[in-house]
Amino acid sequence: MSTHPVDDATFTKPLIRALHRHVDQLAASIPGPNTHTDHQRRQRIAAAWVYLSAVVAWAEDHALIDVTLRTGLRKVPARFTAGHARPVVALAQAMGKLTIHPATQWLMHPAYNTALHAGTPTDDAVQALGDWWAADAPSLAHEVTSGPPSITGWIIGDLLQAITDERRKGFALAQTPWWVCDFLLDRTLIPALTEFRHERLIRTMDPSAGTGHMLIRTMDYLWEWYTTGRCEPRSAGTTATGGTRVHPQWALPRVVASVDGVEIDPLTAAIARLRCTVYAAHLAHTAGYATGPLRLDSIPRELTPRIGVADSLLLGKVNADTYASAHPHLATLPGASFTGGDWDHAAPAGQPEPTPPVVLGQLDLFDGIAA
């Protein structure tokens, strides 16, 4: 039986129940007619605010950003302020600290987090949410004996499905437990490591990346492979051996370059980008060659994962016009392919194929890396 907090119902159920209570409180404070349709709208807005507050709390608990939410959102009488000290504004500013890195800049963008911009809860409701995070909410940083450390953001990945709107469930967002990820990787990635052990780079792709659970575990496997030349199975199977061992300083760019993902829901993809970027930086710190504290605003921009927003069933199979007719929002989404070039759509009949997209802008991840 796993003792990991994300598998422990005595930890997760009270947390989710409390967050749902705050969703209801925030939703009730948002103006709108008393209709079923408008109730759903207000619930979506409230869930967006509450969920991103959980991401802020996780980031503060791991010292990734300055602490604001965990110390309480001070409510200052309006006569002493120009409005900037309101709880709603304070929470929005705390959320804004999450967007400081190029990999996380879209977390609050209207095209990625539409519900967040669709309405505003009252100061009293937000103050109550802030008070709960400061006084009663559990820490989202925890020690583990096995499985992913809490710096991977596993809990915030799970919470996206647990508390956000029904529309995201329509994208079939279903979180894969970490031990299921390990089971799958033991039977897919480890055999691939053995087969392609002489390759300098092992390329992986998750076409339905979700919040990044499989990508995070893949990074663990590849980190072990590149730094030791071998990879032990987590559940059952044969150890992969025969890889080329490289210094952790050069292993990390290989890990980042090896992990690719595509996700159809913009906010879900943005959370995956956040988690994978932070975890890549964490690996650098555990290896002992990164200096200073692990903070979101100091993570090198090259630790940016390739996680795009697209319909992976259509991408590369249809031309750009057909794709846009099926997904007009995704076709105009800023930063969709994000880490390089435009998406590689199929060419219309009779026209030459487009050139491949540039990977990761102009950055050469292998500059100076020995073959």
Image: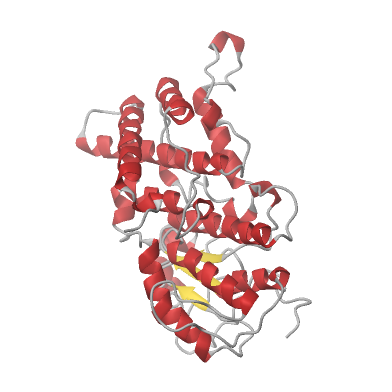
In this orientation, which residue lies closer to the viewer: 198 or 43? 198
**Residue shown at 35% from the left, 31% from the top:** 22
On the rendered image, what quadrant is the C terminus found in? bottom right
When the figure is inspected, residue 120 is found, relative to residue 323, above or below; the finding is above
In this orientation, which residue lies closer to the viewer: 355 or 78? 78
- Taking the view exactly as shown, the residue that stands out farthest to the top is 79
- Residue 178 percent coordinates (x, y): 40, 62
- Residue 52 percent coordinates (x, y): 46, 41
When the figure is inspected, residue 279 is found, relative to residue 326, above or below; the finding is above
Left-right relation of 65 to 153: right
- Taking the view exactly as shown, the residue that stands out farthest to the right is 368
Give the mark count: 0
**Residue shown at 53% from the left, 67% from the top:** 220
On the rendered image, what quadrant is the N terminus found in? bottom left
When the figure is inspected, residue 327 is found, relative to residue 58, above or below; the finding is below
- Residue 299 percent coordinates (x, y): 68, 54
In which quadrant of the rendered view does residue 199 lie?
bottom right
In this orientation, which residue lies closer to the viewer: 120 or 260? 260
Residue 348 visible from this viewpoint: no
Residue 14 visible from this viewpoint: yes
Left-right relation of 259 to 281: left
